[in-house]
Amino acid sequence: MEIVKINKEDSLFKEIVDIYFEWWGYKYFDNDSFYDYYKSVLEDKDLPRLYALLDNNSLVGMYELNDHDRINVSESPFLSNVFVKEEYRGNGYSRLLINDAIKEAKDLGYETLYLRSHHENYYEKFGFVLLKEVETNIGRKRIFGLKLI
């Protein structure tokens, strides 16, 4: 198993974007504009970044580090879109992804890593604490934070 940074030219890019589209993107975009959206956000800048967990070059799961996670809050960076393919679930791979995201955020020099989630008693296992709840254009969201230093 290895976790690699993905850019818009990588062969796995379309597969990842297709999964995200089926998961949540279809609610806000048509397929072509969603693909174009992801290509545009993965420009050569610090964030966002897209990472993939691979097993012999086959996609197992992925996550993103984002500057804002598509909601209007001042906190940054955000861990978002942690996803493990169904056939790989139950093997601790989300733990690998989350721990890698924590390491990457530290390596990038951030003091705190944030995320939003409706899950209860999951991200707390990694040290994240509930900071606040905010009302967004897609409903009420819970914002968690993890001190990295």
Image (cartoon, rainbow, N blue to C red):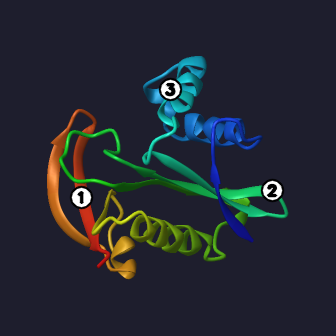
Amino acid type shown at disc 1: Ile
Residue that badge 3 annotates = 37
Q: Position of residue 92 (x, y in %)?
A: 61, 76
Q: Mark 1 Cα within 10 Å, few/some/many (few <14, many 20+)?
A: many
Q: Position of residue 100 (x, y in %)?
A: 53, 70
Residue under the image location 62 percent in, 71 percent down:
93
Q: Earlier in the sequence, mark 1 or mark 3?
A: 3
Residue under the image location 53 percent in, 25 percent down:
34
Q: Secondary structure at mark 2?
A: strand
Mark drawn on residue 143: 1
Do the numbered discs 2 and 3 sit on residues whose CB atoms are within 8 Å?
Answer: no
Residue under the image location 45 percent in, 28 percent down:
27
Give the spatial CA distance, label 2 vs label 1: 32 Å
Q: Is residue 25 above or below residue 90?
A: above
Q: Earlier in the sequence, mark 2 or mark 1?
A: 2
Q: Position of residue 36 (x, y in %)?
A: 56, 23
Residue that badge 2 annotates = 58
Amino acid type shown at disc 3: Tyr
Q: Secondary structure at mark 1?
A: strand
Of 141 and 64, the residue lying toward us = 64
**Quadrant location of the C terminus?**
bottom left
